[in-house]
Image (cartoon, rainbow, N blue to C red):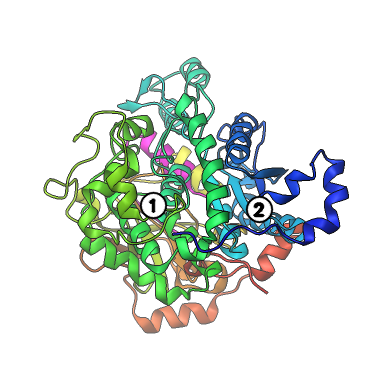
Amino acid sequence: MAKSEFTPNPLRELQKTMWKGVGMSEGDMRRPFIGIANAYGESIAGHMHFRTLAEHLKKGIYRAGGVSSEFGTIAPCDGLAGAHNGNDYVLPSRDVIADSIELIHRAHVFDGIVILASCDKIVPAALMAAARLDIPAMVLVGGPMVSTMEFNGRKGDLTSIVEAWGMHQLGVIDQQKVDDLSEVLCPTCGSCQFYGTANSMCCLVEALGMSLPGSALIPATYNERTRDAIATGEAIVNLVKEGIRPSEVMSFDAIKNGIRIAMATGMSTNVVLHLMAITNELGYEPDEILPLFNEMNDTTPQIVQVNPAATYDMEDFYKAGGIPRVMQRIKPLLNLDVITSSGKTLGENIEGYRFLWPEDDRVIKTLEDPVNPTGGLVLLKGNVAPDTCVAKPSGIAPEIRVFTGPAVCFDSEEECSEAIAAGKVKKGDVIVLRYEGPRGGPGMREMVVPLKTLKGRGILTDIALISDGRFSGTNNGCFVGHISPEAAEGGPLAIIRDGDIVTVDTVDKREVNVHLSDEEIVARLADWKYEPKKIGGVMGKYMAHVRSANTGAVVAP
């Protein structure tokens, strides 16, 4: 498999005096030089243990004959940013993180790089940076936190507190119960316990071959996590020596494998958004990638259903065999010849994987006995979403996968949440939540609070919600996000009025339609007026350059 012997970078001779200033030796200059991009942060549970993890990574790098240089990048937390306008800033951070990693590499020139990332936007940013740099690269994830007490019919997690707040609004539980829950719902470090965007993206990293087999779901507090860090350090040095680059690992066939595993496991709708941005860095056009989602949905049974669609959490998923067990069980549907960051093909990884826990058919089912006959994500169109939008049938109760009702319209998440709290959203309504797209927000925040509050109020299965914003992977119910073009760009979502009848069909037609004639839509759009928000700083630049959600909300000149 080796392509060439590693040759020390001659440029290192010019800078070796500076490198000696930080403790490097003459012999270090002849080793593969590995950059470590560490998204450590004290305020983010998914990353707070990265200092320790980085030390084990360095041990592996040195053991394999490399030398490392660690640097930092930012890591905003969706949970801390939620329920206020801080959430507008999280998606834009994805491009800032990718840019910062690119800048340090271009300035210092590494032979290879490992990026430490666990949480929602940081993981896709890591893959975007790896694709953009196209030097030997891996992503080391920190693993999910473990769960604690059960609440509201499932293992409790971060979002249980929002459900509790909805129950408190109805007088079902008191404030003391809410406060008590806040003490125990996040008991350890690690990414949140549900199959939200963070853990979905960590699993996608493994599915694409950019991390070691089995690494995605090792809980953050397990000692196996530190062994994985050491093994990752050894693997990146091997990748440098063999000259294997991300463009080879994340090939078109590997991308199809990744989407198929997303379908088989019911990943977050945000995987669509982020994979579009990652494949943009790899040079693919949207029309090359978008059709793959429905194609893979139609031909991939869903064999995993975990929180938020079931009672099992990430630790259960890990013990059942994680992504390697999923790959083993859908093996006939995968391209096994793709190369991975282990230095082996996917087929070799599956064949040689050592499972540490017994099989659990309750958590990871089989092709012969799936959870659903088709996959967990679909793309929809229709007169409300002429370009595209995303739904998650695996999280929608079968009886509401086709939903028709009168629209009740809101122009911000805050306005919507206030109406829900006041009891103004009724059973049978279709909530239209707009001006929360990439430009309209700006920043395309997650609409996690409205849906979780509706669940806490007991009417989640009696409403639908459509939006140009995003949703958390922990959401379930009849929701549709990423509507493109967004309202702020004059998409039809902007002209829906209270009382208009809207149909969401996530099964047969895969469409979102408002029951208006084409002529009425054109006439309303002709009268539509919109004043963009006047914002300076980073968000002003973001508004000026961000593209539509169906492109991955990429930022481009």
The residue that disc 1 covers is 207
**Quadrant, the N terminus:** bottom left
The image position of residue 185, as x and y in percent, is 47, 23
* Residue type for callout 2: Ile
Question: Quick one: 399 or 221, which is closer to the camera?
Answer: 221
Q: Is residue 235 above or below residue 499?
A: above
The residue that disc 2 covers is 97
Q: Helix or strand or loop: what does disc 1 sit on?
A: helix
Q: Earlier in the sequence, mark 1 or mark 2?
A: 2
Q: What residue is rendered at 39% in x and 19% in y?
A: 149
Say left or right for 93 vs 298. right
Q: Which residues are magenta?
A: 445-467
Q: Is residue 413 magenta?
A: no
Residue 461: quadrant of the picture: top left
Q: Is residue 120 visible?
A: no
Q: What residue is rendered at 62% in x and 59% in y?
A: 442
Pointer 1 local density, CA inside 10 Å: few below 14, some 14–19, many at least 20: many
| Mark 1 to mark 2 CA distance (whole Å) | 22 Å
Q: Helix or strand or loop: what does disc 2 sit on?
A: helix
Q: What residue is rendered at 47% in x and 65% in y?
A: 248
Question: Quick one: 371 or 532, which is closer to the camera?
Answer: 371
Q: What residue is rendered at 61% in x and 70% in y?
A: 530
